[in-house]
Each structure stands twice: as C-alpha cells, then as structure tokens.
Image (cartoon, rainbow, N blue to C red):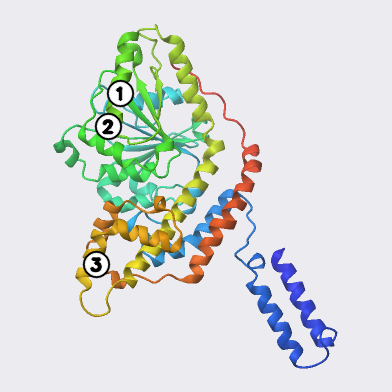
Amino acid sequence: AQGHSNFLLTLELKLLAWSGCLYGPSAANFCRVDKMLSWLSRDKSRTDDTVAFSSITDGLQRLYKEKLLPLEQDHDFHSFYSPPLTDSDFSYRPMVLLLGQYSTGKTTFVRHLLSREYPGLRVGPEPTTDKFIAVTHGPADQVIAGHAATVDSALPFQQLTTFGSSFLSRFEIAKTTCPLLESFSLIDTPGVLAGEKQRLKRGYEFEAVVKWFADRVDMILILFDVSKMDISDEFRRVLVILAGNDSKIHLMLNKADMVTTPQLMRVYGALMWSLGKVIDTAEVARVYIGSFWDEPLRNDEQRKLFEFEENDLYTHLACLPRSAAVRKLNDLIKRTRLAKVHAYLLDHLKKKMPSMWGKDAQSKKMISNLTTVYQTIAKEHKLSLGDFPDPKMMQEKLANLDFAGFSKIDTKKMERLEWMLSVDFPRLLQLLPGEMSQIPHSEGIVGGASA
C-alpha cells in the first residue's frame, strides 16, 4: 500500500509538470519535480526503512536479515560471539533447558512432566543420560540423530554443526506425540561430572554447548539433589557461563521428601550459601522445592509446600508460549545493541593504528587498556558501558588479530540499525498485545507431590 501511494504521488507530480499547471511549461519544471521526488525518497517515513510487519516473528526475521545481519558480517560479529541466526530461531516453539549434576532427577522430571517415556529414555542411579536430547512434538515416536537434525531447516539446531562431529554424535532429537510438547520443547542434558578426566573424555566443549543452548532457550531449570549439595568444578564453570541469562534461571531442589523439615531447612540454607559464591546476581533465583517424580512421597511433612511449589512451577511452564515473543524480541534487541558497540569498537581500534611502524606495540597497548578504550568509545558515541562485551573475553579474541584489517563503519548501515532500535522495535512491541490475546492458554500440567 505504501509503494502504491508513492507511485501515484510520483505520477501526479510528473503530470502536473508536463501540463504546466505546477510551475508553468518549461524544461526547468522537470528539474524541480526531480528535486521534490528526491526529497520524497529521503524522507525515512516513506522509504523501505519503514515497513509493515504481519507478525512479530515476520518482523524479527526481516529486521535481522535486512538491517542487523549485514552489519554483523561487516565486523566479523559471528567470530567473536555467536553464529548468525536462522528463521527457525525466531519461529520455533519455546524451549526449556534442564541442567544439573548426574542423578539429580533431570530425566525423571521430563518423564513425570510428559506422563510418559520419550524414545531413548534411560533412568538410573548412575550417569545414564550421556547425550543432549531435544524432546519435541511429533506425529509418532521417532529418534533423529544429530547430523540429520542439523540439516532440517524447520528446527533451530543448524548452528550446532560448529561444535563438530564429536558433539553431533552425542546429540539427538526425540519426537513423541505428547500434547504438552506442542507448547514447548525440552532439552535434556548429560549430568555434569566431577573430575578433569571425565570432562576431557567428552570430546567436545561442554560449557560452550551449554552456553549456546542457554542463549536461545526461554527457561533454564537447574536441578539439585538434597543429598548432593557439593558443586563440582565443571558444574561451577557451567553456572558461571550462564551469565547474561539470569532472568531465565530457575532452581529446583529435588527429592525433598527424603529429608525431614529441619533437615530441609539446613539443606536450603547450604544451597543458597554455595550458589552465592558462584552466581553473582543482585537478586536470588527462584527455588522450587519438591519431589518431582511419579512416586508417592516418602516423607509428607511438607506436602502442602511441595504441592504449592509444583503448581507454581507448572504455571510458569504453561505461560511460556505467551511470553516467547517477548523473549525473542528482547534477545534480538540485546544482540543489536551488542553488534552496535562491537562495530564502534573495531572501527575505533582500526583508526588508532599507525600507518607505518609500531602497529604491534599500539595494538598490545590498546588491548591492555581495553576498559579505557570502552570508556572513550562510550563517551564519544553516547553508548552505555553495560552494552559492551566482557573485557577479558575481548582481550583474548583480539590478541592475535590485525586491527588494520578491520572494516570501517558503513554510515548507511549504522543509520538503518539506529532506525531499527528507535522505530522498528517499538512498532513490533505494539503488536504484542494483539498476538498474545490470540495464543490460547496452555492446559494445566498435573502430577507430582500429590500422587
């Protein structure tokens, strides 16, 4: 409709000039009309920078491809942070990531939640889940191997190929007909091990894979066993790498029916004390206390508490489809702000390099004083220091790079990015109430402590 109205206006101006009704019949008329048309094309409210979105998903996909991705490619964003996003990253249903040390009840909780077993499920006191398993909805029970799963464009797992064949052989998709999985998918993970030897035997970077999933899921459930409160070194690293996803993290203190009320209070206090040394956040993460499986409670002193906690957790899970659009929009805004400061950072480093001699010394100086560089860029371009990446991570990434090879900022692309932040994203926010009202409330999830 916008393009049609522009065409009619252009045609009307040309006809007026041709007939002499606008300025009088002369060759100069057409020059004046061309100037008016040039002004019209520069008016951002009438150009392609202002587009109509049919849905939030459509808007996110188009904005990323047309405005953010070109800037990411110019400044090698994907080598520093994460691979490019795909359409399925925006359109796929919500996902829930389950983490925890071995035998804390992750797989048992999935079975309890679905009220059935999924293909390939194994449960035992030893570390039984040795793979990352995406439990999703399907027309029939089916297991899809990792290599095959990454070539399916309908699934948001194509970027997992960056972790190599060693990981893909330890990843699979389990499809089942459970109606609950139409609302969200579950990511079951291997139990976090204790000891360097077991960690090295994995054959892939476990923490990096966890970080990849954590950045894309809608909810992270971390399970603890009341009888295993120690936090291993690898588990500590996993908790640290979740930084930046604090709002997604929810804790589950599982198997709470195995202890008495006084013991449960001491266990809860010990958990909070241990986590306080690892998770550096101003607010304490929500902890759900209960026994999340299908068996009767062994100690029902706190039955009402367990039932309340379980209902609270399942209510949160049932609301995921309604909050997924907000989460995806929030994540893209965060990625856009990071790409913006990243572009300014690399542009600044390039400009400060000498044209002839002393390049190595200058690059090392800027790397060692990176926090000061951050402050200079933030002040110059009126950026928030909170948008800048972790200095230690950037120092490691920049150590072996040639700053002179960085790309300069494309002014037009940066203007389109600014337009995206100031105009396009607020317009997408206006679509949220309408889309959320069309999403049906998920049916209640039942089971657990009252069983």
Image quadrant occupied by the N terminus: bottom right
Q: Position of residue 437 (x, y in %)?
A: 65, 37
> Front-most of 178 and 242?
242
Q: Position of residue 236 (x, y in %)?
A: 25, 35
Secondary element under disc 2, as helix, strand or loop, is loop
The amino acid sitting under disc 3 is Ser
Alpha-carbon span between mark 3 and mark 1: 44 Å
From this viewpoint, is residue 66 visible?
Answer: no
Q: Name the residue under label 2.
A: 277
Q: Name the residue under label 1.
A: 271
Image position of 71 (left or right of 270): right
Residue visible at 17% across and 42% down? 200
Residue 254's place in the image compared with 403, above or below, is above
Q: Are marks 2 and 3 in contact (CB under 8 Å)?
A: no
Q: Name the residue under label 3.
A: 363
The amino acid sitting under disc 2 is Lys
Residue visible at 61% across and 50% down? 55
Image position of 332 (left or right of 400): right
Q: Position of residue 312 (x, y in %)?
A: 49, 22
Q: How crowded is mark 2: few (under 14 residues within 10 Å), some or many (20 or more)?
A: few
Q: How crowded is mark 3: few (under 14 residues within 10 Å), some or many (20 or more)?
A: many
N-terminal of the two: label 3 or label 1?
A: 1
Q: Position of residue 234 (x, y in %)?
A: 22, 36
Alpha-carbon span between mark 2 and mark 3: 35 Å
Q: Residue furthest bottom?
A: 26
Secondary element under disc 3, as helix, strand or loop, is helix
Image position of 362 (left or right of 91): left
